Amino acid sequence: MKIRKTKQSNSPKPEESSDSDEPQVEKVVINVESSSSSENDDDSSSHASYGPNDASLGESDNDSDDDSVVPVDSPPKKQKAFSDENSKWLKPKKKETIDLLSSSSEDEAENEKEKEGENDGSDAESQDDDDESVELEVERQSRLLDERMQEEEDEADEEMRDAVSKHTSVYHLPTKEELERDADRVVPPSELRSHIDQILEVLADFKERREPGRTRSEYVDQLGLFIAELYGYLPELIEYFLSMFSPAECLEFVDYSDKPRPMVIRTNTLKARRKDLALALMKRGVTLDPLAPWSKVGLKIIESSVPIGATPEYLSGHYMLQSAASMCPVMALSPEPKERVLDMSAAPGGKTSYMAQLMRNTGVIFANDLRPDRQKATVANMHRLGVKNVIACTHDGRKMPKQFKHYKFDRILLDAPCSGLGVISRDPSCKVQRTIADVNKTAHLQKELLVAAIDMLNHKSKTGGVMVYSTCSVSVAENEEVVNYALQKRDIKIIDTGLDFGSPGFTRYQQKRFHPSVALTRRFYPHVHNMDGFYVCKIQKLSDKIPGETKKEEAVEEKEAVASKPVKNTNNNNEAPKRAGKKKKRKGKKRAAASEEPREPTKAIKLSVPPTMQRQKKKKKPNAKMSKPRRVRADNIM
């Protein structure tokens, strides 16, 4: 048996209907020759041809020696299987014939099936693409939710791997030799940040994560150097902050100190209301919100398309640019109408104008500042805001008690000059210009100003007798130490500020211990309250007594009492004893007299006898008639 496969190349192309787009399939022709003992002269040969739509066998009358292939007649015209509009994408299943006598025909049939399957698959894929393009909203949301959940799972796995690697590894703290070797190399910020994070992790679990042979102070010192290099501070300032805060809080404080604070304006209630001002600014394209529940006049500017310091409302005096932290000292002082108030460091007039509007333009406010050039801004702001009860002056605050000796004040606000370590975001030069020596020098000036302010306070005032001490610094030397010094030098006490927010003041710092009432003071931090670093303390004066001076005065009085006792005269002579010289009372030298040691009883005591009283002669009253000039009559003159 011989099997031969030929392609129908010479045969004419059969006619097919226009509706069928089916590809042409190869035709297989099988010639079977058999030698038989039959008497027929002509050899029988069978020819089988397979088409896509016809399974009939074709026969030929040619001899067996002839290898020519007889083409099969064109198949009949195919009828439409579907008549509706779905006929474009629905196709009937194709019938296939398989020759059981030939194994190769099976392979060919399988190949044809694969080709048809590919064609059908491509059509199905195109149809699926069309279906996917029309996606329902529920399906889209479900798909997005699945993608989000998958992303969260991937992130969780990554965090877990990072946490395991961090907790299992031991951080190597650089030694001095390694640091000296890399002194000339510029360390990228990412590497510094990595060192800082790893040191903080070690300090959080120091017992388990520390490197053998290393102390905690070594880690803290190296952390300070890395923070100073990353944020551009002097190392001594970072060391000072580390003594005040924990390492993690110190990093947070330094980080937030570089970020700008939100812009805040204060409504001038002498000319406008906050609601009306907010509407007017919103019409000009300003996005704003109320500052906080504790402020009734503050507005926080979120976004503005116009300059806030040049609007018609600003020029008309409807508001004042003022930070949220600087409003707190005035709120703590809370001046009342018709009072006598002193602002010892007034320029440029933000707190002074706030006090004036709380006093409703009544009473009197002395706005003092040492520098006359800064007072120009104070006077200009008072005129713009419509304040009429302010007197501007330029005196040295340390000498003001002598100048206002007979003029006491009901309330005093002392916003003392400071190092500015709480407003680094507004003045970044403090990072490299301020040193610990400058902080201590400023603290000495603040102590003098605070004592002078207490001396000018009227403790007998019915409505006042209080003062507020504030600074824009976070250092302990300029805040708690100054207040504790005043408690020792004057008869005062610290009272509650009346502010519901803020952190309490320090009662201990390193080896120093302060008065327990210092906890009533308030501290404000950038990383906690999103405000400038500030300190507020409210003080009430009890009396004019000075604790140190009262003891000295008592000692002097006792000495004078002992010296003034009379001594009996043992002499028989009638001569009176000589008078002891009178002690001259010298003003201003009480301290020198108190510092002298009391005399020993063995030394001779000078005798003092009370002087004899001399009777004063009564003066004769002149006669009233004699005292008046006599009238001269005109007759005598004539």
Image (cartoon, rainbow, N blue to C red):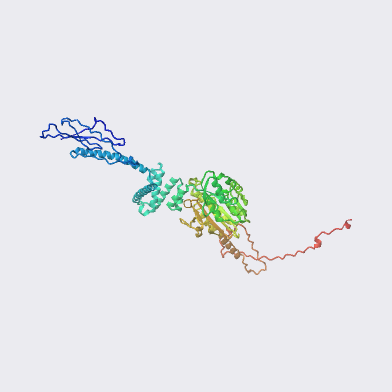
Q: State the image coordinates of residue 419 (x, y, percent, origin top left).
A: 51, 49
The image shows residue 412 at horizontal and vertical percentages of 58, 55
Give left or right: position of 121 versus 276.
left
Query: Residue at coordinates 10% horizontally, 33% vertically from top-left?
Result: 39
Quarter of the rendering occupied by the N terminus: top left
Left or right: 426 in relation to 569: left
Visible in this render: residue 447? no
Vertical side of 231 occupied by 36: above or below: above
Q: How many marks?
A: 0
Quarter assignment of residue 84:
top left
505 or 310, which is in the foreground? 310
Q: Residue visible at 17% across and 39% down? A: 101
Report whether 470 appears left or right of 103: right
Where does residue 177 sit, x and y in percent of width and height?
A: 37, 45
* Quadrant in which the C terminus is drawn: bottom right
Q: Residue 92: percent from the left, percent from the top?
A: 29, 41
Image quadrant assignment for residue 330: bottom right
Which sits in the foreground, 452 or 37? 37
| Residue 17 can be seen, yes or no | yes
Q: Nearer the viewer, residue 85 or 90?
A: 85
